[in-house]
Amino acid sequence: MSGAIQEAVVCHGAFDYRWEDVPVPTAEPGEVVIEVGACGVCASDVKCYTGAPLFWGDADREGYVKGPVVPGHEFIGTVVELGDGAGEKYGLNVGDTAISEQIVPCNACRYCLRGQYWMCQVHDIYGFRRNVPGGWTRFMKFPSNARVYKVPSEVPMWQAALIEPLACSIHAVERGEIQLGDTVVIAGAGTLGLGMVATARLKSPAQLVVLDLSDARLEVARALGADITINPKREDAVRRVLDLTDGYGCDVYIEATGHPDAVKQGLMMIRKLGTFVEFSVMREPVTVDWTIIGDTKELNIHGSHLGPYCYPIAIDMIANGKIDASKIVTHRLPLRDYLEGIELVRSGADSIKVLLEPER
């Protein structure tokens, strides 16, 4: 495919995503080229598109995005080319279904050398840095230092596209250190939150509570294993959780809404010595009363980033029906309709997971 051209979405800046011609990648030693079957539109893609300071910078910090770049980090595809040694390294053949973790670690910094590759100092993530273009195109490449996995061929592409977000959900639940008998609250029933519901259910908490402003999403949460659902628009969520726990509060609170109010809400409903997991990528900095975290409740505050060591678990969950992907994937659009996909996720009213599928 050397010299070939393909069409792709290219991010040039906030609100400046263009349909352009880009080169079809070829596989050098250790590299893998896939034909993309599907690629999700993530909430972080929307924040990037709409100019969130985390991605584009402001007076206080440099932006994360280094464009122009093809977006998309929730991809899945079919292997079409293997560089020398790549097949043996990953157990892949041409025609297999394959996925790469969203981060491409440098394998040389302090974190990578300690096995903490998901916190790599270089921190190249597909779709945000020009040297690692993402999946909003037909053909994309996994570099030689990527972390690549084979996916069972019987898993449909539209289901396998949930592997990346599900891996992130699994990691967040693991950070919660859920114990038998715990009351667990998951705030947010989007793609990530619903993956957390399905994963937390496997931990057998005494009560699994899900909060969201959408009744339709709460219905999906119940189907995936939530015991109790609460819509904070219609009832006092903090009071309800306190009532469910004899006034103590929940043992574990996982924030997956991306809204500052959910952080404050969690600090009010979590018990003393509880574990608060912050997963969301916030559009702007969030201010809270740190006295609650320290002197008042002595909380365990755990961050959660990406899905390290969780891809094999996510692949198994999807392949073996431990999570029903049909309840999460609500829209499958042609790649050319990427702006519609962004707006569907941005509004959040009628969608959960939106997938973009390149034309064959």
Image (cartoon, rainbow, N blue to C red):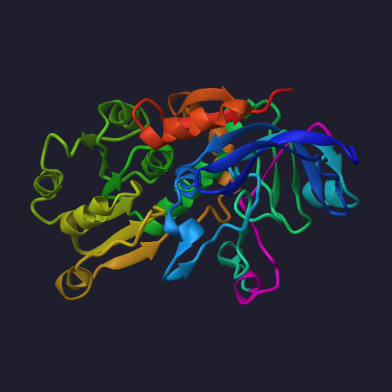
Which residue is at a point 55% across and 66% down the rendered structure image? 119
Q: Is-magenta flag for residue 183?
A: no
Along the line of sight, the residue nearer the viewer: 290 or 287 = 287
Left or right: residue 246 compared with residue 169: left
Quarter of the image where one finds residue 319? top right
Left or right: residue 309 compared with residue 189: right
Residue 318 placement (x, y as % from top left): 55, 33
Determine if residue 81 is in view. Answer: yes
Q: Is residue 341 above or below residue 197?
A: above
Q: Magenta span covers which residues?
A: 94-113
Along the line of sight, the residue nearer the viewer: 91 or 34 = 34
Which residue is at a point 37% across and 40% down the rendered structure image? 197
Residue 221 placement (x, y as % from top left): 33, 32
Which residue is at a point 60% across and 63% down the rendered structure image? 123
Left or right: residue 315 compared with residue 326: right
Left or right: residue 166 compared with residue 151: left
Along the line of sight, the residue nearer the viewer: 22 or 159 = 22
Q: Is residue 192 above or below residue 344?
A: below
| Quadrant of the drawing holding the C terminus | top right
